[in-house]
Image: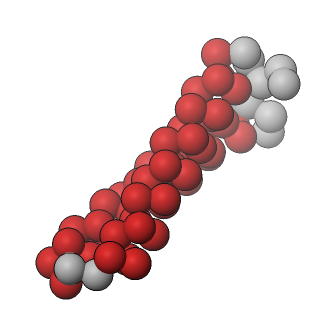
């Protein structure tokens, strides 16, 4: 299970990024500054999550 966790984290980060970009597109169309800020923060969270998962994969699951 420890080996599957980084892969599941990558899938979660990809899903979060997809949702964030969808929100970004919608917010830009409505010119909603608060939704734009939320989408930008969500994109950063997805990038961070993917980086953490990639690091975990490189280290072989050793923290």
Q: Is residue 31 above or below residue 48?
A: below
Q: Is residue 29 above or below residue 51?
A: below
Image quadrant containing the N terminus:
top right
Q: Is residue 50 above or below residue 32?
A: above
The residue sitting at the right extreme is 63
Taking the spot 77% from the left edge, 24% from the top edge, the residue there is 61
Q: Is residue 11 visible?
A: no
In this rendered view, identify the residue nearer to me: 39 or 17: 39
Q: Quadrant of residue 22?
A: bottom left
Taking the spot 48% from the left edge, 60% from the top edge, the residue there is 42
Where's residue 35, x and y in %?
37, 77
The residue sitting at the left extreme is 29
Q: Quadrant of residue 20?
A: bottom left
Does residue 49 appear to the left or right of 20 in the view shown?
right
Taking the spot 49% from the left edge, 49% from the top edge, the residue there is 44
Q: Is residue 35 visible?
A: yes
Where's residue 27, x and y in %?
26, 76
Taking the spot 20% from the left edge, 80% from the top edge, the residue there is 31
Image quadrant containing the C terminus:
top right
The residue sitting at the front extreme is 33
Does residue 15 appear to the left or right of 49 in the view shown?
left
Where's residue 14, x and y in %?
44, 49
Does residue 5 appear to the left or right of 51 in the view shown?
right
Q: How many marks?
A: 0
Does residue 10 appear to the left or right of 5 in the view shown?
left
The residue sitting at the top extreme is 59
């Amino acid at each position: 299970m420890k080996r599957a966790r980084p892969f599941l984290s990558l899938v979660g980060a990809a899903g979060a990024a997809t949702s964030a970009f969808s929100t970004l597109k919608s917010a830009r169309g409505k010119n909603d500054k608060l939704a734009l800020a939320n989408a930008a923060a969500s994109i950063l969270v997805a990038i961070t999550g993917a980086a953490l998962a990639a690091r975990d994969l490189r280290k072989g699951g050793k923290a």
